Image: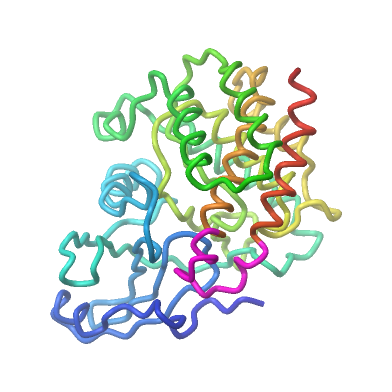
Amino acid sequence: MIPETAPPRDGEHPDTAALAGWLNAPVRIQQFPAGHSNLTYLLSSALGEFVLRRPPLGPLAPRAHDMAREFRLLSALHPHYPLAPRPFRLCEDPAVLGCPFFLMERRHGVILRDEAPPESDRPAISRAFVETLAELHSVDTADPAIAALGRPDGFLQRQVQGWIDRWERAAPAGAPDIDLAFAHLARQVPHSDDSAVIHNDFKLDNLMLDPAAPGRVAAVLDWEMATLGDPLFDLGVALAYWSHAPSLGLATRPPGWWSRDEIVHAYGLRTGRDLTALPWHELFGVCKLAVIVRQIHVRWQRGQTTDQRFSRFGEMVEELGAIAAKLREHLT
């Protein structure tokens, strides 16, 4: 079991004195050790408990891990979607921690990572997973604060080119299945007029559940990639985690969990959306995961993180490539 918090890993301890000076209060720092991307800490002070989010160490992809953007997004979204934690304070002064970071409220609950819930709870959690995503996609995008979060026009085309560019910068030799899948996706970008607030990394371990009622979601976490775009893109990424990448989270294939088709059926009933183009989005979701996994593995290879969980991420890229090849067969 991964503990909720632990002493910061070697090389990842924020400057406590600098934080105390910035807050004008003594602070204590613990790390949330389970994340794969941004570094996240529990900051305790006389002002209360907060979650501190900052980018990972080492060189970053352009426009990735933008803490100021995530802070502004949460500021706009929280009043409309209370499952998004309320942000507290943003720091863009590099003299404090050497990078932008922000504080947000701490929510309490259970995050499912490596320990499965009882089989009897799994259907309720599956339903909550779908309904939480559908509720996000129902947020009114006409509100000016929400409308400013992204540019839905041309969203899919930008996503295709942006993730191809990231893949080419990070890709090793010998990953032809992802190369072929991206080429196929670029040739067949579906037409889309639908727009919603999308999380862009919606997965089971980004949900915090009420320990007294596991079918109730207490918070949705990790909003760094959220924007306005096609809601099927969000569903495709969610399915990539749920059905195709169990090694990146808790396996949802054992008895009690909803199947991929049950997730899709429930989402369609809840939203009334046309799901014809979903297979394209599902393939994109798998390719996107391959890019993220490869980027994290590169940081581990360069010694920019010592987290041993990342040592086998190179194998995961190959696994995701094989999945992408199977999904692509159904699109040709």
Q: Residue at x 47, y 28 (%)?
A: 161
Q: Is residue 63 above or below residue 145?
A: below
Q: Is residue 305 above or below residue 208?
A: below
Q: Residue 18 sits in which quadrant? A: bottom left
Q: Residue at x 39, y 48 (%)?
A: 61
Relative depth, front residue between 81 and 264: 264
Q: Main secondary structure of the magenta part?
A: helix
Q: Is residue 159 above or below residue 25?
A: above
Relative depth, front residue between 15 and 258: 15
Question: Which quarter of the rendering shows the C terminus?
Answer: top right
Is residue 172 shown in magenta? no
**Horizontal arrangement in the rendering, residue 258 relative to residue 134 (left or right):** right
Q: How is the image coloured?
A: rainbow
x%, y% of residue 264? 70, 32
**Horizontal arrangement in the rendering, residue 133 relative to residue 315 (left or right):** left
x%, y% of residue 296? 53, 58
Q: Is residue 283 above or below residue 53?
A: above
x%, y% of residue 295? 52, 53
**Horizontal arrangement in the rendering, residue 116 relative to residue 241 (left or right):** right
Question: Which quarter of the rendering shows the N terminus?
Answer: bottom right
* Residues rendered magenta in the picture: 298-312
Q: Residue 255 sits in which quadrant? A: bottom right
Is residue 309 shown in magenta? yes
x%, y% of residue 291? 56, 45
Q: How many numbered discs, if any? A: 0
Residue closest to the far front: 173
**Horizontal arrangement in the rendering, residue 18 relative to residue 309 (left or right):** left
Q: Residue at x 60, y 30 (%)?
A: 182
